[in-house]
Image (cartoon, rainbow, N blue to C red):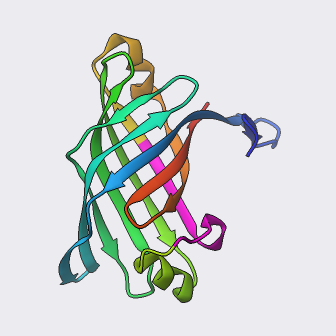
Amino acid sequence: MTPETSLGSRPGAATVNLEPLATFHVELDPILDLGDSQWGRRRVINIIGGSFEGPRLSGTVLPGGADWQVLHADGMASIDTRYTLRTHDGAHLYISTSGVRHGPREVLDRLARGEAVDPSEYYFRLFCRFETGDDRYLWLNRTLAVASGARTADAVRYDAYALT
């Protein structure tokens, strides 16, 4: 994507722009497998740290929080994260993401083994919401964001874009 991409050209429709927000690097503990449920295989992946850097948002990912993930029979993972960020200037932000990761079985098997896999080989997209009481970042409470992610053996990296 270009730094700012416009979507929607139908007459009378509002234009949606994607503005780069930040690149997130979220460090993870090994997967805790809770077993099968009626929705799929429940897994919890604890968040142990990380960082984020962008034009309007940068800082560190605090330890704590997790991805309460469901792995479905077809290999798709339903993503559900909640964790805390500390900005470079000391503000604390709550972030939640929801999304999906799926792809060909052989690609997902390589990811599961911790192998390096080009993110173009699978689909990993997120919807991001933020919450804060810090006056400097109240704009995030009213901002929706989307992201494209990549999984490594011990981290997730994703590029987030504010919908403007």
Measured as percent of width and height from the top left, residue 81 is found at: 32, 53
- The residue shown at (31%, 18%) is 90
State the residue at coordinates (44%, 82%). 75
79 relative to 55 in the view: left or right:
left
Q: Where is residue 88 in the image (x, y as percent from the top left)?
A: 39, 21
Q: Quadrant of residue 60?
A: top left
- Residue 120 belongs to magenta span: yes
Please state the total of marks drawn on the protein image: 0
* Residue found farthest to the left: 34
Residue 20 in the image, given as x and y percentages of width and height:
62, 34
In the picture, the quarter occupied by the C terminus is top right
Which residue occupies 55% across, 81% down? Answer: 107
Residue drawn at x 35%, y 52% is: 27
Region of the chain picked out in magenta, as a range: 116-128
Residue 58's x, y, as percent?
Answer: 46, 27
* Horizontal relation, residue 71 to residue 42: left or right: right
Kindly give the residue lying farthest to the top in the view shown: 135
In reply to whether residue 17 is colored magenta, the answer given is no
The foreground one among 112 and 97 is 112
Q: Quadrant of residue 129?
A: top left
In the displayed structure, does residue 117 sit left or right of residue 120?
left
